[in-house]
Amino acid sequence: MSDASDMTTAEMTDRYLLGNYGRFPVAFERGEGGYIWDESGKRYLDFGTGIAVCSLGHSPKVMQTALTEQGGKLIHCSNLYQIRVQAELARFVSETIMQRSGKTFFCNSGAEANDALIKLARKRAFDKYGRESGKNEIVTCRQSFHGRTLGGIAATGQEKVKVGFDPLLPGFFHTPFNDCEALREAVDDKTAGILFEPVQGEGGIVPVTPEFMAVAAELREKYDLLLMFDEVQCGAGRTGDWCGWRTIQRGSGVEVEPDVVSWAKGFGGGVPVGAIWADDDCAGALGPGTHGSTFGGTPLVSAVSLAVLEEIENKNVLENVTRQADRIREVVDSWNLAPALELRGVGLMLGFVLDPDAFDHGDKTAALSVVSKAMEAGMLTVPAGDCVVRWLPRLDVPDAEVNEALETFHNVLKSVTK
Ligand code: PLP
């Protein structure tokens, strides 16, 4: 093997890694709390948290402790056996997150969780109505994002993820998000499930409306299908409630609960984990031998995820999410800068909608240009599409970091204003 010591990280990335990511020209070495340092020693305030993953910031004590304690006891054993800490994590999902009786399956990512959820919907319809019924279709929304597996890209309502991967998994239909009439038209007795994100993330931080959820629930009754929410990005506390849809429904008079939910990202605070929860009425569809994952819910990942979620619960982190989101909105509402049209989102899942015609962004998209300028200024944010910049700070973000973000980002927007 050749000696790589004289190669930069950029050169090694280019030489050895598949070119499937468009990466920023920076390599991070160390993180602590809300900050992350690159190889040159430059410090950044991290308001991207690895795309909504590091819910308690970088290397929090609670994760370090769980990693070392569980790591010293048992890292992996297989789902051939019972795993106490995995069952404890599932108990947390039913009793604290869902507050309903149901069953959880663990995997390793959001796309895998959505694959499991699609399989569950199809299997349940198959068991109940038989193959001849043709009840196997899944209705999802335009601009949605559900992951990069073959199931995930079939479910995703954005053409760009599908191009070149034909033949796609059949049986998926995409309806305009939040269009109640279109949803009514898209669903019929062949529909096994409706799937959407309570807050579309990659699609540009767009919350679902309570009315859309109410119509989806009405169609569930009419056609005996499963209502499935993808909380991969908006779940696990990001909206200020354990469940994104509950934050959105609060005060609306609508009370709709899903049959199945998927999570990943912030659910484990940085360890690779995905999960689905299914109501007792449908969970039995995935019986022995129907689905599985070697690494799903290992003792190590379960212990760390449980430690993260318990910390969020015990330290009133959800209250902090709501309080900081209110503070951010109050300040941003007073900005009045042409490039920023609107601040969208729920809790600490926020999207600055940019007007691409209001400033010069060269050959970059408006979002990429602002994200790059914020990086130069020492702050990480995340683009969503061409015109939205996401703020996804850690859920326990303190006042000082919010103040710093507001000041830095305000300066960035001012600097690009014509
Ligand atoms: N679902 C949603 C809503 C997401 O935002 C993502 C990732 O961004 C996924 C699914 C896919 O998750 P993963 O990248 O962990 O497979």
Image (tube, rainbow, N blue to C red):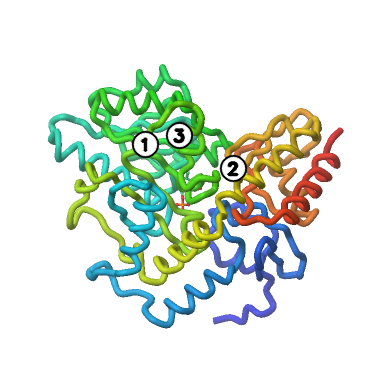
Q: Nearer the viewer, mark 2 or mark 3?
A: 2
Callout 1 secondary element: loop
**CA–CA distance between discs 2 and 3?**
24 Å
Disc 1 marks which amino acid? Glu
Residue tagged 3:
157
Q: Nearer the viewer, residue 282 or 381?
A: 282
Q: Which mark is residue 92?
A: none
Disc 2 + disc 3, Cβ < 8 Å: no
Q: Secondary structure at mark 2?
A: loop
Residue type at mark 3: give it: Gly
The disc placed on residue 347 is: 2
Q: CA distance from mark 2 to mark 1?
A: 20 Å
For marks 2 and 1, the one nearer the N-term is 1
Name the residue carrying label 1.
257
Q: Position of residue 207 (x, y in %)?
A: 53, 33
Q: How far is mark 3 from mark 1, CA to CA?
A: 23 Å
| Amino acid at the residue labelled 2 | Gly
Q: Determine if the C-beta at disc 3 is less than 8 A from ligand 1.
A: no
Task: Using the rendered image of the protein, determine whether residue 19 is visible from the camera's viewpoint.
Answer: no
Q: Earlier in the sequence, mark 3 or mark 1?
A: 3
